[in-house]
Amino acid sequence: MAERSLDSIVVLTGAGISTESGVPTFRGEDGLWRQYRAQELATPGAFHRNPTLVWEWYDWRRGLIAGCEPNAAHHTLAEMDRYCQDFVLITQNVDDLHQRAGSRRVVQLHGNIWQVRCVAESTAFENHDVPLPQIPPTCSCGALLRPHVVWFGESLDPDMLTTAYQAVEGCQLMLVVGTSAVVQPAASVPVMAKDRGAYLIEVNVERTPLSPWADEVILGPAAEELPKLWARLKEAM
Ligand code: BV8
């Protein structure tokens, strides 16, 4: 890595970066809520069929996330954001822990669990009620509110996707942390970066479908490995 100057870094994170903060992952054994798989509940169909059930799940997650703190991996990425000239953090997580750690240049590809949207007016706004006083919550117009997140089968915000794709153009280092790299289109971002000449480093407790593309696969918990990796990278800068 030594030969490259490092002033353009893009990072993609997934649920694994928040595991050590106590936030359950999606696919790990802790990804289950009651008997439901997260992927079953995070769909427009599930909400249409049973908005109360889906909101009980989000209320549970909001309550859990409200009690969590960013960990050393989140804080390391916030330091990289302050240190690096051209830095973009693309996250699949809706837990807001990157922002709470001080990260500024964040693309929340799949939305934010602390934002809600009126299903009639499509207006989105912050809501930090824990627990929610009423389930399902409703808008002042009387219509249902839904979590302002991207569900499976729903398209991502095109501006956010464009920002992510533009970020990988010419980035020197693509860092991927704590994702199983199966959910599209997020999982294709690091492959695009690699195809465009970026040095690809993956940090995960296990190998993923992305590992064959990586120049380095660092197997270990993100909160332990990321501070060490950043110290090594800073030496090379
Ligand atoms: C779309 C928000 C157009 C909600 C989320 C067939 C083939 C390809 C694609 C598709 C297909 N069929 C359907 C699709 C499209 C689908 C998709 O990709 N499905 C997958 C499952 C195959 N994608 C979509 O629907 C997207 N929209 O494509 O629109 C379209 C529409 C219809 C049909 C075609 C196209 C929308 C996707 C976004 C969905 N919303 N979240 C909410 O959070 O409530 S996705 C959600 O799940 C998360 O945001 C995240 O993206 C994903 C979970 O993945 P990870 O974050 O990686 O977490 P996971 O638990 O899987 O893994 C954790 C990892 O961490 C593991 O690797 C583990 O080893 C590691 N780890 C654990 N502990 C640690 C650690 N690593 C380091 N340190 C540790 N301590």
Image (tube, helix red, strand yellow):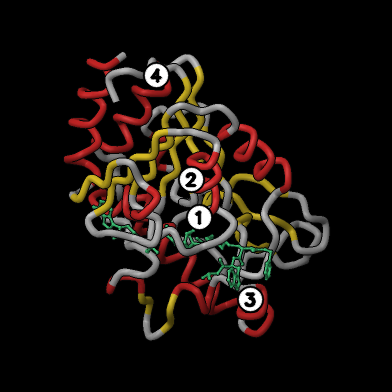
Q: Which residue is mark 2?
A: 190
Q: Earlier in the sequence, mark 3 or mark 1?
A: 3
Return the x and y of residue 107 as percentages of the image width and height: 56, 39
User: How far is disc 1 from disc 2 in space, using C-alphas?
Assistant: 7 Å
Q: Secondary structure at mark 1?
A: loop
Give yes or no for contact between labels 1 and 2 (Cβ–Cβ under 8 Å). yes
The residues tagged by marks 4 and 1 sit, at their Cα atoms, a distance apart of 23 Å
Quarter holding the N terminus?
top left
Is label 4 in a helix, a strand or a loop?
loop
Placement of 43 over or under 86, stated as above or below:
below
* Numbered badge on residue 201: none
Front position among marks 3 and 1 = 1
Q: Amino acid at mark 4?
A: Leu
Q: Is residue 103 left or right of residue 110?
A: left
Q: Secondary structure at mark 2?
A: helix
Which of pointers 2 and 4 lies earlier in the amino acid sequence? 4
- Judge by depth and name the residue closer to the eye, 136 or 43: 43
Residue 16 position, x and y percent, is: 32, 54
Q: At 19% across and 39% down in the image, what residue appears?
A: 225
Residue highlighted by disc 3: 47
**Residue 187 shows which numbered tag?**
1
